């Protein structure tokens, strides 16, 4: 039984990209790389494709954090501070669960990100539910990015 991990989305299976890995024994995060060459335009948000999706248990999520060295050296940040990939995002009908990293470029010039550049880290987290949560009626996810706010 597979508990949690990463897989390629179908459009990137043969594109010579790697699944995320931890670099040291005590690293909390799995390094996530850009699946394509991307230019980050000045003072703009750019979605960087990773070519991967994440599967996990129903009471878990994948937190997405920008790599600190990349962020500090290039004056870029995640537009939402931390990305949250829910368990039901995996294999959704809209985009197969493709993890896209939303980066904001604080510079007045372009920043080039090469395919294979480690741009973010993914950390799997467990979460808790509030009392009476079972009384809520829940929708079934029908799409990808931003679909639960519709």
Image: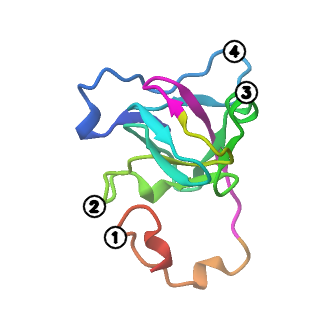
First along the sequence among labels 1 and 4: 4
Up the image or down, 26 lies above or below 139; here it is above
In this rendering, the label closer to the viewer, 4 or 2: 2
- Residue 26: image quadrant is top right
Q: Is residue 141 left or right of residue 23?
A: left
The residue under label 4 is 25
Residue beneath the point at 73% across and 73% down: 130
First along the sequence among labels 4 and 2: 4
Q: Residue furthest top?
A: 24
First along the sequence among labels 3 and 2: 3
Q: Is residue 45 left or right of residue 99?
A: right
Q: Is residue 71 left or right of residue 6?
A: right
Asked if the residue under mark 2 is in contact with the one under mark 1, i.e. CB atoms within 8 Å, the reply is yes
The residue under label 3 is 69
Q: Which residues are magenta?
A: 112-129
Q: Secondary structure at mark 3?
A: helix
- Residue 18: image quadrant is top left
The residue under label 1 is 142
Asked if the residue under mark 4 is in contact with the one under mark 3, i.e. CB atoms within 8 Å, the reply is no
Up the image or down, 59 lies above or below 50; here it is below
């Amino acid at each position: 039984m597979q508990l949690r991990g990463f897989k390629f989305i179908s459009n990137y299976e043969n594109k010579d990209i790697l699944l995320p890995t931890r670099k040291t024994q005590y690293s909390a995060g799995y390094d996530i790389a850009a699946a394509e060459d991307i230019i980050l335009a000045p003072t703009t948000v750019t979605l960087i494709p990773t070519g991967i999706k994440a599967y996990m248990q129903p009471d878990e999520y994948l937190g997405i954090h920008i790599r600190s060295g990349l962020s500090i050296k290039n004056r870029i940040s995640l537009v939402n501070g931390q990305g949250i990939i829910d368990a039901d995002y995996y294999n959704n009908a809209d985009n197969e669960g493709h993890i896209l990293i939303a980066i904001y470029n604080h510079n007045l010039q372009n920043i080039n990100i090469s395919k294979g550049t480690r741009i973010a880290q993914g950390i799997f987290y467990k979460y808790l539910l509030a009392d009476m949560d079972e009384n809520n009626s829940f929708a079934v996810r029908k799409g990808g990015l931003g679909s639960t706010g519709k």
